[in-house]
Amino acid sequence: MALLDRAIVRILPAVPRPVVQRLSSRYIAGPSLDDAIRVVRRLSAKGKLATVDVLGEDVTTPDESRAIAGQYHDVLARLDDEGLDANISLKLTGLGLELDYELCRENLEAVVGDAHARGNFVRIDMEDSTTTDRTLRLYRELHASGFDNLGVVLQAYLRRTLPDLPGLDNVRLCKGIYIEPPEIAFREFEAVRANFVRCLEALVAQGSYVGIATHDEYLIREGLRVVRAAGLDRDRYEFQMLLGVRPDRADDLVADGHRLRVYVPYGSHWYEYSVRRLQENPKMAGQVASGLFGRVLGR
């Protein structure tokens, strides 16, 4: 079955977009903000938190980056108007990081300032290793200028992550999905897991608020062990998962009294996100394809 899963992943770029959309629909709220709000409401009814992400990383002009920033202002306004307990996640390339550092900072500061005025929070996603230094620099610059409603993401597969932790007071910790050279990234599955646990223990020890972002059952159990051993109050950490991935396990964590936040992406740039998510998890692609083809054959 693993060979079939990987085969499905390899042919994804040749698959018609409507089929990819069907394959990935459980992982994306939809193309519009209304779709995202509908999903956030549904999650809230189940006791889950949300972070909303506007899809769109490959901007090529300053106007496109400002348009993405404008969509985040719209998200913040809707969340505020509807009283929903959700925040936002954003990628700096979508705000113009690869075009101009100051342009990106201008867009980011405007969004973070809007969120601050509304009592909301902004999470800066981490991208591939070429952006890590600039991402951490922007986080530290804005945090030093008084924005305390800001957090960042770190990836456990990077060898540099443990030394990057000091001074970061709000971190989403994940494994990481980008393909990086072995000189800078752990490649072995167990090595990534081990570094995840080391980084989590260090974050808890330095008093950071931590988002434990994983679907890996071993790391979920290790996360529970670490926060219990530290005697953390349940408002000092949260678990985080992707929309459509292990919802039953998320329900269990909520039932046990843990904060659980779901990543809710939406937007017109759904195709690129869909292919990346399915490529990073061949088993997921195979399972979804099997379900889709089963329904087709059943009809």
Image (cartoon, rainbow, N blue to C red):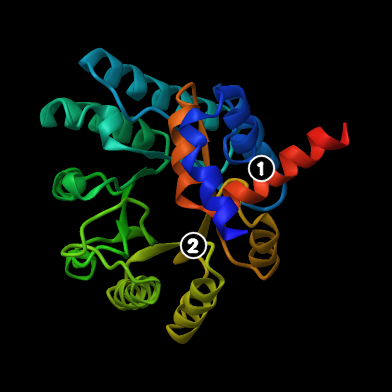
Q: Quadrant of the C terminus?
A: top right
Q: Secondary structure at mark 1?
A: helix
Which image quarter: residue 146? top left
Residue 283 in view (yes/no): no
Q: Nearer the viewer, residue 252 or 267?
A: 267
Question: Counting residues from the N terminus, which is met first, the one under dot 1 or under dot 2?
Answer: 2
Residue 132 located left or right of residue 194: left
Q: Which residue is mark 2?
A: 214
Q: Secondary structure at mark 2?
A: loop
The amino acid type of the residue labelled 2 equals Thr
Residue 70 in view (yes/no): yes
Say which residue appears at 30% left-offset and 29% top-offset. Answer: 94
Say which residue appears at 82% left-offset and 36% top-offset. Answer: 297
Q: Vertically, is 48 above or below 190?
A: above
The amino acid type of the residue labelled 1 equals Ala
Q: Which residue is mark 1?
A: 289
Q: Whole-Å distance between the Cαs marked 1 and 2?
A: 23 Å
Across and down, in percent, residue 250 comes to 64, 60
Across and down, in percent, residue 183 comes to 16, 64
Residue 31 located left or right of residue 110: right
Query: Residue 115: which numbered mark, if any?
Result: none
Say which residue appears at 55% left-offset and 29% top-offset. Answer: 15
Q: Quadrant of the N terminus?
A: bottom right
Residue 111 located left or right of residue 181: right
Q: Nearer the viewer, residue 111 or 195?
A: 195
Q: Nearer the viewer, residue 125 or 2?
A: 2
